[in-house]
Amino acid sequence: MRRESFDQSPEPVLERLFKKLRHAKVMRHIPAASIVVDLGCGYKGEFLRGLSDRIDQGIGFDIYVSNSKPAANVTLQTVRVDDGLPLPGAFANVVTGLALIEHVIRPDALYRECFRILKPGGLLLLTTPASRAKSLLEFMAFRLKIMSYEEIADHKRYYDRESLVQDLIQGGFKRENITVSNFELGFNLFVIATK
C-alpha cells in the first residue's frame, strides 16, 4: 500500500507541469453549479480547490488527506476509492479521477462505484497514461529522476483505448456514451463517459 497521497510531499517540477495540464484538460468539461466527486484527490485537494468558485460542492477522496479544508464548499475524506464510497447513489453530477486508475488495485470496483454515484446524465472524467507511455515514464522516473519514482513505481497497469472502454462497459457504462481521446502528445488518455 502507498505510504502517501499525491502532493503529500514536494513533487518534482515535471510532475507539477503534468498536473497543471491534466487539471486544465478536465476543468473545462465540468458544468457550473455541479456536485463534483474527485477520486484520488491528492493530499490537499488542489483540483477541487481550483474549481470551488464555480461548483456547488466538491468532495475529494484519497488514502491520506489534509485536515485543512481547501475551500468552504469542499471536503476531503480519507477513503480507498476502490473499497466503496460513502455516498448515496445518483449523488454527483461529475466524478473525476486524474492520473488515478493506473494506481488502484481493483479498477472494476472503482468503475462500478463511479456509475453508482453518478446522477443520470452525469459525467465520469478520467485521465491515465497510455500504454505507450510506460517506458518513457519509467525512464524519466527511474533513470533521469525528473518524475516521482514512487508515483511511477505504483502504477499497476497501463491502458489503450479499447481496454479502457471494455473496463468501463464492465462498470455499467454504455459504449456509445464513452469517448476516449489522446492528449499530452498521445502519452495520456482522456475519458468522458456519460451515465
Image (tube, rainbow, N blue to C red):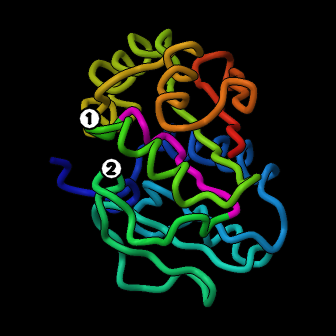
Q: Which residue is mark 1?
A: 154
Name which residue type carries label 1: Asp
Viewer-proximal residue, 192 or 148? Answer: 192
Assign a secondary structure to mark 2.
loop
Q: Quadrant of residue 162 in the image?
A: top right
Where does the magenta region start and end? 93-102
Name which residue type carries label 2: Asp
Q: Quadrant of residue 17 in the image?
A: top right
Above or below residue 178? Residue 123 is below
Viewer-proximal residue, 130 or 20? Answer: 130
Q: Which residue is mark 2?
A: 82
Name which residue lies at 49% across and 40% down: 99
| Residue 95 is a magenta residue | yes
Q: How many marks?
A: 2
Above or below residue 150? Residue 162 is above
Q: Is residue 47 left or right of residue 39?
A: right
Q: Earlier in the sequence, mark 2 or mark 1?
A: 2
Q: Is residue 19 left or right of residue 192?
A: left
| Residue 68 is a magenta residue | no
Gap in angstroms between the C-alphas marked 2 and 1: 15 Å
Name which residue lies at 47% across and 60% down: 41
Above or below residue 139? Residue 7 is below
**Closer to viewer: mark 2 or mark 1:** 2
Position of residue 5 measured from the top left corner of the image (x, y, whole percent): 32, 57
Viewer-proximal residue, 126 or 162? Answer: 162
Number of the label disc, if any, that sits on residue 193:
none
Name which residue lies at 48% across and 68% down: 60
